[in-house]
Image (cartoon, helix red, strand yellow):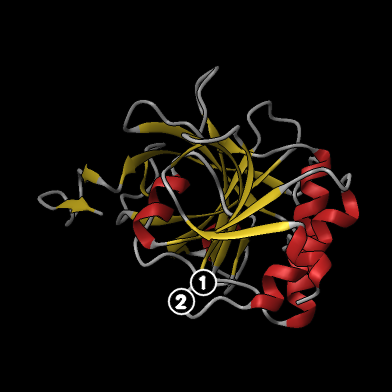
């Protein structure tokens, strides 16, 4: 790692901080896409990565790159991210880099979506049940993939779901639906800051493949699918299924 890169970054195990919100914006999305591209080219990315606004107890808050790993930190991976950051921002701008443990990451995901994910969490972010009169199905585990900007004021939440929806019901033949897009169903509600459970959502299916480097929709990449309810996976009792007597805790 070069001395120049070392002087421009701080890489820590996570100290006491408060995660505020995902760092969003056109410039930030360009940064995320550039980091994803670099990691993909080098095949050295983490399990998951987040760009989040943080508040510290001992100094002024700022923006941090939080990384979840299942192995020892890769110095090249971190340098790639920091070099990319300083290639896009002023030399006096600062980026902290933290390695987060599983419990810290769960807390982080309550306010921030990953912008890079090579492997999903071992536990879901929440569970989904359909509510629009469709055939009663088993609850689906939902894993946040990333947040995308677009025509909806709150943005769009891209999720991986398990088990998938059967594609044949939606004219897709043998191609099942493994990823969906969600938005809040009620005016003013947010799928990124859910305050009341269960949460009513509108679920959309993708009509095109969405690259890992895409962080905004043009508007024609998805179509309406179903209404659904989301249940908090930390302490949700799921109704109307084999899960109905089970409290799922993280």
Q: Nearer the viewer, residue 192 or 186?
A: 192
Query: Disc 1 marks which residue?
Result: 119
Closer to the camera in the image, 65 or 40: 65
Residue 83 badge? none
Q: For mark 2, give the secondary structure.
A: loop
Vertical position of residue 4 compared to residue 107: above or below: below
Q: Residue, x 31% and y 49% (percent of image)?
A: 136
Point 58% across, 54% down: residue: 114
Quarter of the image where the N terminus is located: bottom right
The quarter of the displayed image where residue 153 is located: top right
Q: Residue at x 34, y 26 (%)?
A: 196
Circle 2 packing at 10 Å, graded few (<14), some (14-19), many (20+), is: few
User: Which residue is at the far left?
Assistant: 245
In the rendered image, residue 122, in percent from the top left (x then y), is placed at 36, 67
Q: Who's the residue at 32% across and 41% down the image? A: 231
* Pointer 2 residue: 70
The reply to whether the C-beta atoms of the residues labelled 1 and 2 are less than 8 Å apart is yes
Task: Tell me, yes or no, if residue 29 can be seen here.
Answer: yes
- Location of residue 113 with respect to 4 vertically, above or below: above
Q: Vertical placement of 227 versus 247: above or below?
A: above
Point out residue 42 in the picture as x, y percentages from the top left corner. Answer: 76, 81
Q: Is residue 57 left or right of residue 133?
A: right
Q: Which part of the image, by quadrant, shows the C terminus?
A: bottom left
Observer-nearest residue: 76 or 123? 76
Q: Is residue 205 left or right of residue 246?
A: right
User: Dot 1, crowdedness within 10 Å: few (<14), some or many (≥20)?
Assistant: few
Using the numbered discs, state the Cα–Cα distance from disc 1 to disc 2 in whole angstroms: 10 Å
Q: Which of label 1 and label 2 is nearer to you?
A: 2
Q: Earlier in the sequence, mark 1 or mark 2?
A: 2
Q: Is 190 drawn above or below residue 113 in the view shown? A: above
């Amino acid at each position: 790692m070069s001395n120049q890169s070392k002087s421009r970054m701080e890489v820590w195990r996570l100290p006491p901080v408060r995660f505020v919100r995902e760092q969003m914006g056109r410039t930030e999305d360009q940064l995320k896409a550039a980091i994803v591209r670099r990691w993909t080219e080098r095949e050295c990315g983490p399990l998951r990565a987040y760009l989040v606004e943080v508040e510290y107890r001992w100094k002024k808050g700022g923006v941090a790159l939080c990384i979840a790993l299942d192995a020892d930190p890769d110095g090249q991976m971190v340098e790639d991210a920091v070099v990319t950051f300083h290639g896009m921002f002023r030399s006096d701008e600062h980026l902290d880099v933290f390695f987060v443990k599983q419990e810290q990451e769960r807390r982080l995901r309550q306010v921030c979506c990953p912008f890079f994910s090579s492997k999903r969490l071992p536990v879901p972010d929440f569970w989904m049940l359909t509510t629009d009169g469709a055939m009663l199905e088993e609850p689906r585990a939902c894993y946040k993939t990333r947040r995308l900007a677009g025509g909806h004021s709150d943005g769009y939440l891209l999720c991986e779901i398990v088990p998938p929806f059967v594609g044949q019901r939606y004219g897709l033949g043998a191609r099942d639906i493994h990823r969906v897009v969600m938005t809040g169903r009620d005016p003013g509600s947010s799928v990124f800051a859910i305050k009341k459970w269960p949460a009513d959502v509108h679920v959309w299916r993708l009509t095109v493949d969405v690259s890992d480097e895409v962080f905004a929709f043009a508007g024609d990449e998805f179509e309406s699918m179903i209404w659904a309810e989301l249940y908090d996976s930390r302490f949700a009792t799921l109704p109307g299924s084999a899960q109905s007597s089970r409290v799922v805790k993280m």
